[in-house]
Each structure stands twice: as C-alpha cells, then as structure tokens.
Image: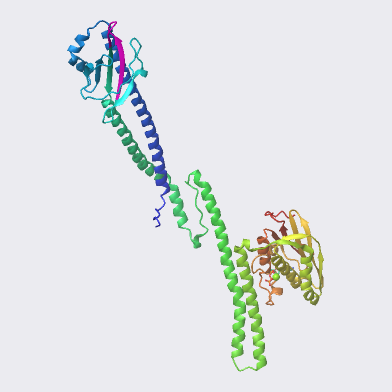
Amino acid sequence: MKTPRLPPLSLTLRSALLFASVAALVISVVGFYLYGNIADSMRRQAGFQMSGRVDYFRNLLGNQFPLSRLSENPHLFENMLGNERDILIFQQPGLPPLINVNPRGYFLPTVAPVAAGHPLSLAAVHVATTPDGVPIRFVTALVNIDARQRIQITAAHVMANETRMLEQYRNRIIEATIGAFMLIALMGYSVLRQGLKPLRHMAAQARSIHPATLDTRLSEQGAPPELHQLIGSFNQMLDRLADGYRRLSQFSADLAHEIRTPVNALMGHCQVALYQRRTAPEYESVLVRNSEELERISRLVENILFLARAGEAHSAIQPGSLSLGAELTRVADYFEGLADERGLSLDCQGHGEVWADAILLRRALSNLVDNAIRYANQPSRIILSGRRSGSGWIIEVSNQGPVIPAQSMAKLFDRFYRADNARTSSGNSTGLGLSIVQAIMELHQGRATARCDADGILCFSLFFPDRKTSNPSAS
Ligand SMILES: Nc1ncnc2c1ncn2[C@@H]1O[C@H](COP(=O)(O)OP(=O)(O)OP(=O)(O)O)[C@@H](O)[C@H]1O
Ligand SMILES: [Mg+2]
C-alpha cells in the first residue's frame, strides 16, 4: 500500500526546526555532560564519606575503646549515621555481627575487607544495589583491637537521595531541551519569516509577469546581496523568454502572411472559374495553377515542420565521416542541368573527410546551390569548395550576383526574409531555405555565415566541427 506523501515543509519552517534541533542538541549535550559530572562527584563523595566513617571507627577501636561499650549502645550508631537507610556493621570475621545497623535489611555481598593498618582509598569502595535498584556504596575494613581480637567494620551508604536528585536533574534537562526546542522553533520561525520577506516580495513580482508584461524585470533595490545573483539570473531568463516569445509571435505573423498569399490565390482562381461555365481546357488550366499554389503551400509546410523538429531534436542527427569531394560533386551533378539552363557553370574544389549527417549535409548544400542558381548573375560561375579550418571543415558556396547591402546580409538567415523581392516574388520562394541551413548547422554544433564583397561575390560558409568538438573555432 502506498503511504500518502506529506506536503514539503516551507523553507522557513525547515530552517526554524533545524535551528531549534541544533540548539536542543547543544543544550542536552551540555546538560548531560554536567549531569555525568554531578553523578560522578556524588559517587566519589559517598565513597569518601564511607571510607572516613570506617577510618573513624578503626581509630576508635584501635585506641583501646572497649568493644563491649559499642555493643551496649547500638542506637548510638543509628543517630551517628544521620541517614535512616545507611548501614553500619561490626563483626568478628566469619561470625554473626556484633552490631548491625541496617534498618531496611539490605543485603551486602561478601567482599574481601581491607587489611588492618592499610589505608583506605576510593579503590576500596564497593557497589551493591537495593531491590528497587538504588546503588549502595560500601567500604569494609579490618581493625586489630588487641593481639587476639580483630573486628571487621562495614559502612554503607544507600544513595537514595542522590538518585532522587539526579532523577530530578535529568527531568529538568529534558524539560529544558524540549522548552528550548519549542521556544527557538517559534522565535526562529518568526525571525526567519521576517528575514525572508525579500524572497516573498520577489515571488510577488514574478507572479505579476505574464506574456503581455514580459518586459518587466525584477528589481534588485532593497534585496539582500544574496538574492542579487538569483534576480540577475531570473532577469536574464526573462530576456531570453521575451526574445523567444517575440520571435515566435513574429514567426506566427509571418507564417499567416505567407500562407494567406497562396490561399487567396487558390480562392481567386476557383471563384473566377466558377463564375460561369468553362471549357475543359480552361478548367484544366485552373487546376494546373491551383496545383502550383498547393505545391508551394506543401513546400512551406514541409520546411516549417523541418525547422520545428530541428529546434527540439538535437539527438536525432546521425553523423558519420563523409568524403567532402564526393558530396560536393554529388550535389553539383544534381543541379548541373538547371545551372546549364540558366547559363551558369558549377565548379567543385577540395577533398577531405567531414563529420556530418549525410542527408542533412546534402540538404544544406542543395539549399545553397539552389539559391546560387536562382540569384546569380548570368552567365557566371558557381564554386563549391571545401577546406580544413581550425578544428573542423569549411564548405563554401560562392556566386557572382547583385551586391547585398550590409543590413540585408545580417538578416539573410532570418525566417521568411528575402533580400530581393523582385526576384523572389515569382512564387517559388518560401524564404526558409537559409533558416533551414542555419538549423542544420546548429544540429551539427557548427556555424553558417555569409559574406558579400564589393564586386557582388556572395559566399556562404558552413563550418562542420570535427567529431566530439563542440566549440566552433572557424577562422
Ligand atoms: N546566392 C545568393 N545570391 C543572392 N541572393 C541570395 C543568395 N542566397 C540567398 N539570397 C537572398 O536571401 C534570401 C533568403 O534566401 P532563402 O534561401 O532563405 O529563401 P528563398 O531562396 O527566398 O526561398 P526558399 O525557401 O525557396 O529557399 C533570398 O530571398 C535572396 O534574396
Ligand atoms: Mg533559397
């Protein structure tokens, strides 16, 4: 069975709880360290007390104090002990006790007594426990009363009070730890909430941004320095989004405009044809013209689809090592007939191995040669060449044509851009050929560029980086 997932804790609550846990941990560690010290000194204290007591009676009996006087006044000892649970036993070794002050009747295990005349130290302190688990610390030692008589003295302290005190102290530590945890969690929460105000302010600003206000930027004013980097990155992201959105809007507008022309033409042809009865050859001519328009729409759609797919599927290309000379010749052969018709010649120069997707390379090259044949001056020469450059290969297609002004050159690769409307208004142009070339080069992590000199020599360069090279460094 799936356990239901708890909602994630807020940053404020999480930090407050973490702070409180650390504080509680520190308090409890310090508390229990002191607890250990106190418990230890209580144990030592009891040990010293018992040793002192035994020593006292050893001196008393060793200084000719008659044993009979001791045994006659057992109650005297009870008063001397000062603790109703403490134990004092006098006995001759191996015989029943002469005096046995043990009001609760606790059992003490038999241990080896400290020999007569030996000083008592903490090492002589033994430990036993009462049936209810309270420790008893006791000392047992021998004293020589005269040459024949030896007495074993046992003094024990039942640590009932100390145990109770330590228990209370332990409870205090636990209470203090819990109290500190709750107090710090509460105070930390409210302090952090206050501290994170700039973040909420930033979130409110971000919430107010929508497609119509994509030019809004988050303000760094009043924000703590830690947030400046985040605000900077967020604003940069907004720049990119706004740019992408603007391009997309422009693309949609251009697309609608591009499709409207052939669709209007189609509608016009049909309406004119339907206006009155026509002969079969007239209908045939309408169908031919419509078919041309439909072809144009179909090419447009196919190009747009290609660009859309190229924009998202970076992994879709299948590059391989291709013979540059063979690829140039192949495309030149394909266009030879068309070039002849327009009085143009095609020259291929260059050899080498280029790392590219064969189908995409041919498509890019075909688009460039198609342009060159379409827009070159007649008669002239179109040159297809390839050469090594930096960490890759450059393929160039150049032709002689009208001089293209610099501001038009910068836009050549834009979608639907045509530099020369007079030549492209024939209906064959979709204005997407160079955008496709650029998209293909991006898929190869390469680059497409164009330059035009003062004599009208227009040269398009495609840089294909070597295998595994991602940064183009074309010269
Ligand atoms: N070799 C060239 N010589 C002169 N102008 C060129 C050449 N190549 C491109 N251009 C100019 O750049 C414009 C954009 O070219 P692009 O290939 O993108 O579109 P297109 O050729 O108009 O249409 P299509 O989508 O059918 O290729 C062309 O309209 C043309 O004005
Ligand atoms: Mg073209």
Position of residue 80 in the picture relative to residue 173 (left or right): left
In the rendered image, the vertical position of residue 278 relative to residue 32, given as above or below: below
Query: Which quarter shows the N terminus?
Result: bottom left
Q: Nearer the viewer, residue 77 or 431?
A: 77
Q: Percent position (x, y) of residue 335?
A: 77, 73
User: Can the viewer see residue 451 in this picture?
Assistant: no
Query: Which quarter shows the C terminus?
Result: bottom right
Q: Percent position (x, y) of residue 327?
A: 76, 66
Residue stretch rendered in magenta on the structure: 136-150
Q: Nearer the viewer, residue 335 or 142?
A: 142
Colour approach in the figure: rainbow
Q: Quadrant of residue 255?
A: bottom right
Position of residue 156 in the picture relative to residue 302 (left or right): left
Residue 351 is covered by the magenta coloring: no
Task: Give the dominant element type of the magenta stretch: helix, strand or loop.
Answer: strand
Q: Nearer the viewer, residue 151 or 234?
A: 151
Position of residue 149 in the picture relative to residue 224 (left or right): left
Residue 143 is covered by the magenta coloring: yes
In the rendered image, the vertical position of residue 111 relative to residue 466, given as above or below: above
Q: Percent position (x, y) of residue 274?
A: 59, 90
User: Can the viewer see residue 409 in this picture?
Assistant: yes
Query: What residue do we see at 32% from left, 24% from top?
Result: 127
Q: Quadrant of residue 92?
A: top left
Q: Percent position (x, y) of residue 184?
A: 36, 39
* Displayed-image quarter of ligand 2: bottom right
